[in-house]
Amino acid sequence: MYGKIGTKYPIWIMLIGAILLFTYYTFRPNQYTHPYEAQVDSVLSQMTLVEKIGQLNHLKGNYSTDIYEQDTDLEEEIQQGRVGALTPFVDLDQLIAWQKLAVEESRLGIPLLYAADVVHGYRTIFPVPLAQAASWDLKAIEQADRIAATEMSAAGLHWTFAPMVDISRDPRWGRVMEGAGEDPYLGSCIAEARVRGFQGDDLLQSNTVIACAKHFAAYGAPEGGMEYNTVDVSERRLRELHLPPFRASVDAGVATLMNSFNVVAGVPASSNDLLLKQILRKEWEFTGFTVSDANSLHEVIPHGVAANRKEAAYQCFTAGSDTDLWGQVYVESLEELVKEGAISEVDIDRSVRRILRYKFELGLFDDPYRYFDTVRLQQTLRRPEHLEAARSLARKSFVLLKNDNQLLPFQPAQYERIALIGPLGNSREYKDLIGNWSGFANPDDLTTVYQGLKEALDTTVKLDTASGCRAFGNCPEAMIEQARRVAERSDVVVLAVGENGYNTGECASRADISLPGNQEELIKVVAATGKPIVLLLFTGRPLELTDILNDVSAIMVCWQPGTEAGLAVADVLLGDHAPQGKLPMTFPYHQGQIPIYYSHLNTGRPRQGPEDTRWGVSKWSDVPNEPLFPFGYGLSYTTFSYSPPTLSQTQLSADDTLKIYTTVTNTGQTDGTEVAQLYIRDQIATVSRPVKELRGFQLVTLAPGASQSVTFQMTVEDLKYWTREMQYAVEPGNFSIFVGGNSQDTQTVSFSLMDDQ
Ligand code: BGC
C-alpha cells in the first residue's frame, strides 16, 4: 500500500524518525545488554528448537526412586542436548563423565549446570538458617554462605537452591527452619547477605556459585501451617510481608528464583503471571531465570487449573516459568506447542538466553571442567577456618531465654558431677543436631553435646549421661526412671531436648508444637529431684514451652547447630562466650495463639496490656495476648541498659536523613554483645499500620561497665508502604520510634514527616 521506502515521507522525516528510534532503543529504560550477549546470540542461532527446549529441562542426576522417578535414559538425553541442568547426587568422577558427554558428544557441546540444595553448608554444616537469623549477624551469615559456596564449588556444583527467603509466622510449618523467621525487614537483610555470600563479586571466580531465592511466593503462609496447603493473602500482605526478601535478593543480583508449590489466591505460583511477569519482570526488572519447584509445573494439574501435561506446560511457560525442575513437561510438550503456534519460538529464545548467559558468566563455555579438581576438593572441605566459622556462628545463634540465679555459665570445675540427660545429648542420628537440608553432610563429622562437654570440662568432673526418652514417639518408663537416677546423683543437670532433625523441614508440619514424645514427662521427673536444670532446646522452629518453663532454671535455644554443635554448646555453657542471639520468630504462650507475631495491627478495640480485663477488647479469654517470648528477645550473661532515644530533628522533610541516638551500656559483670533494635510505627495512615515494624538493628559488643553510643539513620524510603491506592509511597504525619533490646521492651520518641513530598 505504501510502496517503496521514501515514496510516502520525505527523506528528512525518515532520518529524524530513524534517529529517534535509535535513541529510544539505545537509551530506553529496562534496556538489558548482557556482557556475553554476542556469544549467547551466536550459540542460540545454531540451536534447533529441540536443543533450545533441552536447556529448559532440568533432570535429577541420580537414580533414586521416589515420586519424581525418571524413566528417561539420562545419558541419551545429555547426548541429544535435551537437558540443560542436573541436580546430581553423585561423586566428582560421575559429574565429570556427564559433563564430558554434554561437551564432547552433544551436537553443540553446551555445558551442563549442576545444582544442589546447599542450604546451610556443604560438608561444614552451619546452623540451620532460622538459627543463623537468630544471630542477626549479617557478616557472619554472608561468610557462612561464602564458605558453603567454596566447598560446594570445589565438589563440582555451580548452583545452590538457596537462600530460602520465605517469611513465615506459623511455627507449625516445618520449613520455618529454612528461612529467616517472621520479619520482612530482617528477612530482606539476610536474603541480601546470603546472595552476596554465595555469588561473591564475580561469578568467574571458581569458588562462587549462582544462588536461588525461593520459593516465589508466599509459600510461608499455608493455611494451618500444613505443608503445601492453600495460601490466600491480600495483595497488600503479599507485597508487604512475603515479597520484600525476594525483592532484596533481586536487587542484590540473585541469578535465579524458584517457584513455590502453593496457589496464591487460587492461581498456582508456577503459572502465576502476576508474580512471574508483572512483579518479577516488569516491576523488578529481574534478568535472571526462574526454575520451577520439584515437579511443580506438572502439579498445576492436581491444583485443578490444567487438564493435562501439555496444558500445564502451556500455562506455566506463558506465565513466565523459564525452566522445569524434574517434571519433564516442557521437554514433552513445548515443541508441539511451538509448532501449533500456541507459543512463539521468540519466547523460548528469551528463556534459553537467560540460562545461557549464566553458563557464560560462570565461565563454563570457556572451561566446562573448571569446577572439577580432585586436589582442590581434598584441600577445601572442612578446612580449620571453615569449622571455626561454623562453630562461631552456632554460638552466636544460641538464644538464652531464661537464666534464674545466674545458673549459667558453669565454671569448668564448678561441679563434681554433671548429668547430661535427654534424647539429643549424645545422639548420633546426624540430622538431629546437624539439621535437615544437609544432604552432603557426613554424620561422622558431628560433635555431639556429650563430646563437646567432655572435651571442655575439667578431667575431674564426672559427666554422666542418660537419654531419658526418645526424641520422637513414646518410650518405656524404665528409660525415664534411669534418667531420674542419673539426675539424682548429680550436682546439676543439662537437659538436651527438642526435635529430631526429621521433625522439621519439608513435609514436617506439626499440629502440636509442644515437645514431642515423652520429653515433657522426662523434664518433670528430673525437675522433681530438685537439681538445678539447664535446658538446651534443639529445634528448627519455635515450640510451646509454657508447661515446662517453671521446671527449669535456665533455657537456651540451640536450634539445630550443625556439625560443630557440641563444641559451640560447650563454649557457651562454660562461659568462654556469652549467648547473644535474639529470637527471629515469636515463641507462643499457647499454640492456639498462632499466628502470633509482634508486628500485628492494633484492631479497633486494642487491649491496654495484660491487666485489661474489660469485656469487648481484643483478647483470648483463656490465654494471655502476649507470647511467652517475643520477637527480638534474648538474654546474655551480662545485662544492658539503653538511654532514652533522642532524634536529630522532630520534623522531617523529604530529603532529610533522620538520626536516632541511644547509648547502650553493659551493666553487668561480663563481656557481652547486644543486638540493639529500632522499630517504627506510622501512627495515622490511609490503612491500618502495624503497632511496630523493625527498621534497623546493630550489634554492640561491650566490656563490663562500658557504654557505646549507637546511631540509627532513616530516610523517607524507610517510611514507605503500600498505601490505600496500592502505591508504594510515604504519607506525611506522625511516626513513633521505638528502641530497645527486643520488640516488647522499648523506649519511645516521636517525629513528624512534613507535607512537602
Ligand atoms: C523443595 C525445594 C528444593 C527442591 C529440590 C523441593 O521439594 O521445595 O526447596 O530446592 O525440592 O530439592
Image (tube, rainbow, N blue to C red):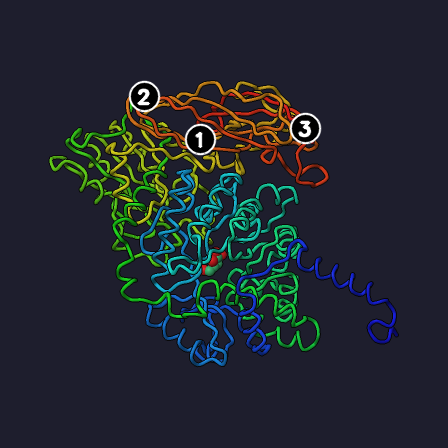
- The nearer-to-camera label among 3 and 2 is 3
User: What is the quadrant of the C terminus in the image?
Assistant: top right
Q: What residue sits right under mark 3 in the picture? A: 732
Residue 173 vertical placement versus 9 (above, below): above
Does mark 2 have its CB less than 8 Å from ligand 1? no
Which element type, helix, strand or loop, lies under badge 2?
Answer: loop
| 3D distance between C-alphas at marks 1 and 3 | 34 Å
Disc 2 residue crowd, few under 14, some 14–19, many 20+, Cα 10 Å:
some
The dot on residue 629 is 1
Residue ID at (26%, 59%): 379
The residue type indicated by label 2 comes to Gly
The residue tagged 2 is: 668
Residue kind at label 1, given as amino acid type: Phe
Mark 1: give few (<14), some (14-19) or many (20+) Cα within 10 Å.
many
Q: Nearer the viewer, residue 348 or 228?
A: 348
Q: Position of residue 572 (x, y in %)?
A: 28, 35
